[in-house]
Amino acid sequence: MCSPQEFDMSTAGTRMVTRSWSRGPGVGPRGSGEEAAPLPRGKSAAEGRKSHHPVKRQRKTQSLKVAYEASDGEKGEGIKPLKVPSWEPQDWQQQLANIRTMRSEKDAPVDQLGAEHCYDRSVPPKVQRYQVLLSLMLSSQTKDQVTAGAMQRLRARGLTVDNILKTDDSTLGALIYPVGFWRSKVKYIKQTSAILQQNYGGDIPASVTELMALPGVGPKMAHLAMAVAWGTVSGIAVDTHVHRIANRLRWTKKVTKSPEETRAALEDWLPRCRNGAGRAPLPPSLLPSLSLH
């Protein structure tokens, strides 16, 4: 039995403890010297008594952009940085499949008379490359049949840098006539041949920039020369026909006004796997009406 005094003390202690722990948020136990964490603004004491658990903040959902990565092997070798897919034209894959079907017979002049068929395979490689470049220079504003005929006449006389430089302008003009703008092309061929002899040992440059620096060589010719002569993908070869049809198919994000603008627009979205290892010319055998040569 405890004494009345002890009972009162015990009872009072009980009341004190009960009272000190029921003071609510913001006030610690009496005599502890500590204060509980204050309520967030706008919260009343009554609201605080309802739960001792902290209020959870809702996380905002974020939309994620779809990305893909390409690799050269199963072990992750050659992994390239993630790339967010860019704009691409609607139904272009179906359109391309239709074109492939239309071109399956390979019956257009370019299939037999293009730049890849105009050089002599029996001559040294650098002479072959020179002949490819000249066939491209002659092909501007000229039908494939006419270009092929001019190349045959040139090859019959020995189509090399040295022989062209030894040929007078009138004879060279007669050999390449009636290609389009044949007088201007006589001048360009002579100037280009002299540069190749002096700076490249009779070979042709191996870059688009250097090729385009040659007289009479434009972007389309340079990209095709890289593909046919060097076997290197450098870009999509676009002429006026490709430019026109690409716009008709709506393969450009907006209407383009020049072949070069069209080339940049096509290279911006056309997957590399569709145009070669890198940026290859669309094959002439695929698009005859586009007349890449």
Image (cartoon, helix red, strand yellow):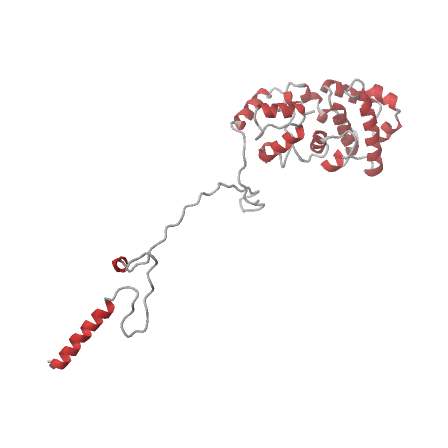
| Residue at 72% from the left image edge and 20% from the top image edge | 144
Is 137 on the left-hand or right-hand side of 74?
A: right
Q: Is residue 203 above or below residue 239?
A: below
Q: Quadrant of residue 100?
A: top right
Q: Looking at the picture, how far across and down is residue 273, in whole percent? A: 58, 34
Is 56 on the left-hand or right-hand side of 225?
A: left
| Residue at 31% from the left image edge and 57% from the top image edge | 43
Q: Which quadrant is the N terminus positioned in?
A: bottom left
Q: Quadrant of residue 189?
A: top right
Q: Looking at the picture, how far across and down is residue 113, in whole percent? A: 71, 21
Residue 207 appearing in the image:
no
| Residue at 87% from the left image edge and 21% from the top image edge | 171
Is 178 on the left-hand or right-hand side of 22?
A: right
Q: Looking at the picture, how far across and down is residue 236, in whole percent? A: 65, 31
Q: Looking at the picture, how far across and down is residue 210, in whole percent? A: 75, 37
Front residue of 107 and 165: 165
Q: Is residue 115 above or below residue 204?
A: above
Q: Is residue 195 above or below residue 76?
A: above
How many marks the image carries: the answer is: 0
Front residue of 26 and 168: 26
Q: Which quadrant is the C terminus positioned in?
A: top right
Residue 243 appearing in the image:
yes
Front residue of 119 and 58: 58
